[in-house]
Image: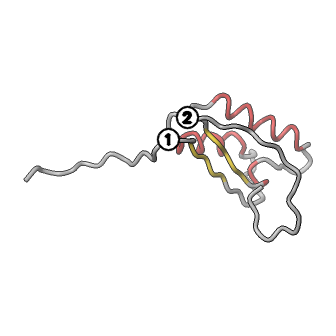
Amino acid sequence: MLAGGLEAAPAGSRHQLSPGDVCVFMTDGLVERPGEDLSESLSRLAEAARSGTTDDLEAFADHLLEATTPAGGRRDDCCLLAFRIGSPARSPRRDPGPSR
């Protein structure tokens, strides 16, 4: 959980991540749908994560957003953060222009 000002630490678990692993943080608006069990929503997200490629994290995040958006659109705000462990940030290739 990402939060500040909590009086007590929530129960949690630990997972060892390795270089190249992709980690995704999200708010509940990504998966919750009125009238749907949360386990179904999380299963949909897990399937989307398995079916996507993490070569391009921006495209991967877009894939997760598209796969979890209800037909009528979202009714709650949504935040998604995806990052790769131990991998330097890739900046877009830019044309350096003519050499001088």
**Of helix, strand and loop, which one carries label 1?**
loop
Q: Amino acid at mark 1?
A: Ser
Disc 1: which residue: 87
State the image quarter where residue 41 is shown.
top right
Q: Amino acid at mark 2?
A: Gly
Q: Residue at x 78, y 58 (%)?
A: 75
* Percent position of residue 67, x then y: 68, 39
Q: In the picture, which quadrant includes the N terminus?
A: bottom right
Q: Tag on residue 36?
A: none
The correct choice, above or below, for 3 with respect to 17 in the image is below
Q: Residue at x 65, y 46 (%)?
A: 65
> Considering depth in this image, is 79 or 16 the residue closer to the camera?
16
Mark 1 surroundings within 10 Å by alpha-carbon count, few (fewer than 14), some (14 through 19), many (20 or more): few
Q: Return the disc, 2 or 1, that comes first in the chain's sequence.
A: 2
Disc 2: which residue: 20
* Percent position of residue 88, x then y: 45, 44
Which residue extends farthest bottom? Answer: 5
Q: Residue at x 57, y 31 (%)?
A: 53
**Of helix, strand and loop, which one carries label 2?**
loop
Mark 2 surroundings within 10 Å by alpha-carbon count, few (fewer than 14), some (14 through 19), many (20 or more): few
Alpha carbons under labels 2 and 1: distance apart = 6 Å
Which residue extends farthest left? Answer: 100
Answer yes or no: do the residues labelled 2 and 1 have beta carbons within 8 Å? Answer: yes
* Percent position of residue 43, x then y: 81, 35
Q: Residue at x 69, y 50 (%)?
A: 25
> Considering depth in this image, is 94 or 85 the residue closer to the camera?
85
